[in-house]
Amino acid sequence: MRVLVLWADERSPNLGVRVLARGSREVLRTVWPDAEFEFADFTSRPAQVPWGRVRSLVKEHVVGRLGMRAWLEGFDLVWDTRSGDSFSDIYGSHRHSVMSAVHEIAARTGRTVVMAPQTIGPFTSARGRLLGRRSLRRSALVFARDPVSAEHAAALGRPVDATTSDLAFAIPAPDVSERRGLVVNVSGLLWHDNPHVDAARYRDTVRALVAALLARSRPVTVLPHVLDSHDRDNDAPAIEALVREFGSDLRVAAPRDLDDARAVIAGCEALVGARMHACLNALSTGVPAIAMAYSRKFGPLFDELGWRHSISLAERDGDPVARILETLDDPSLGDQAREACMRGRASMAVIPRTLEALSIPR
């Protein structure tokens, strides 16, 4: 059994992308223990797939100069993660179009293509909806990671086969070697101008939060979840800016890889973060995570876990720092996080049950 996992990579500087890769491997091996895996993402592009542009993909599909068709035919299952939240056009039509084209070509080669648990939508344009509908209908199975995503799929004419939670809950809990206080994950995506939130307001909120925590004599560790790389939205420059401002009062965690980051998070009292998978790495280890949410992908997923501690960065009303501090003072927060963890892990059971009924041509 050979599995191609699309849009996830165990070596990506984005640890959320590594979560999807590791979670995919863990859950698929419960069905096919001897499965072989290959991962393909923008940071690990196979030479056979010219996916910089849709035109290049279509030309290769017709001409076959690079051997894309033969490469795809070498897999039994194509597991399409869409990076967890990119089955949408909110990140631009180009990204949505390229990902949809790879999905379509894989289906045309006769591969069994499955949409892994992910956010579905929103689609803000007629073309976005058309591509979304096409990918759903070309999929042998479709998993959503929240009920709102399931509703979006049904509205496009292809109900999902099952609703689960995020693949982070398929990853075993790490060993903890060091206990920490609070961990603050700072997002480089939001630190600079971006299409999601007011960057200046986000920076001010993070600075005010760190200052308030330190004023309470609470140890604060800042953690990147997108490691330093050539990508502009990596978290390292934002953390460096905070260290310049607060100096030695801040502790800095510099994880080497996903296992290291999960061990740091699992050993902390609570995490406040704007990277969704930083929050999910916390909840999947039973650690409270207060999400600074910047898109629709946060709320429905956390609500289904019974976790109601997200702060919307898009809302102007109220003081987000005061709300975070109030939540951190809740004595039941740890129990709530452990219950959310159990719900998330229990939701993973539906994936192998559904996959076992899948007929895969060999």
Image (spheres, helix red, strand yellow):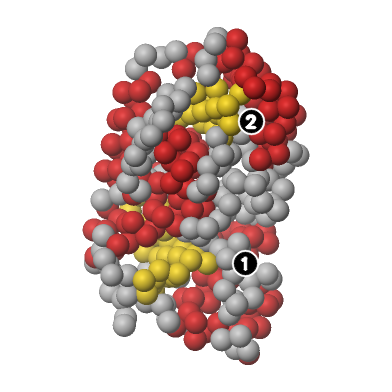
User: Residue, x 35% and y 23% (percent of image)?
Assistant: 334
**In x, y percent, where is residue 89?**
62, 54
Three-letter residue code for mark 2: Ala
- The image shows residue 189, relative to residue 71, as above or below, that is above
**In x, y percent, where is residue 359?**
28, 74
Q: Is residue 282 left or right of residue 221?
A: left
Badge 1 marks a residue whose secondary structure is helix
Three-letter residue code for mark 1: Val
- The answer to whether the residues at label 2 and label 1 have Cβ atoms under 8 Å apart is no
Choose between 296 and 181: the one closer to the eye.
181
**Residue at mark 2:** 314
- The image shows residue 164, relative to residue 272, as above or below, that is below
Q: Is residue 361 left or right of residue 300?
A: left
- The image shows residue 235, relative to residue 287, as above or below, that is below
Choose between 40 and 344: the one closer to the eye.
40
**In x, y percent, where is residue 61?**
59, 83
Choose between 116 and 127: the one closer to the eye.
116
**Residue at mark 1:** 98
User: Residue, x 68% and y 55% (percent of image)?
Assistant: 92
**In x, y percent, where is residue 219?**
53, 19
User: Residue, x 53% and y 42% (percent of image)?
Assistant: 255
Badge 2 marks a residue whose secondary structure is loop
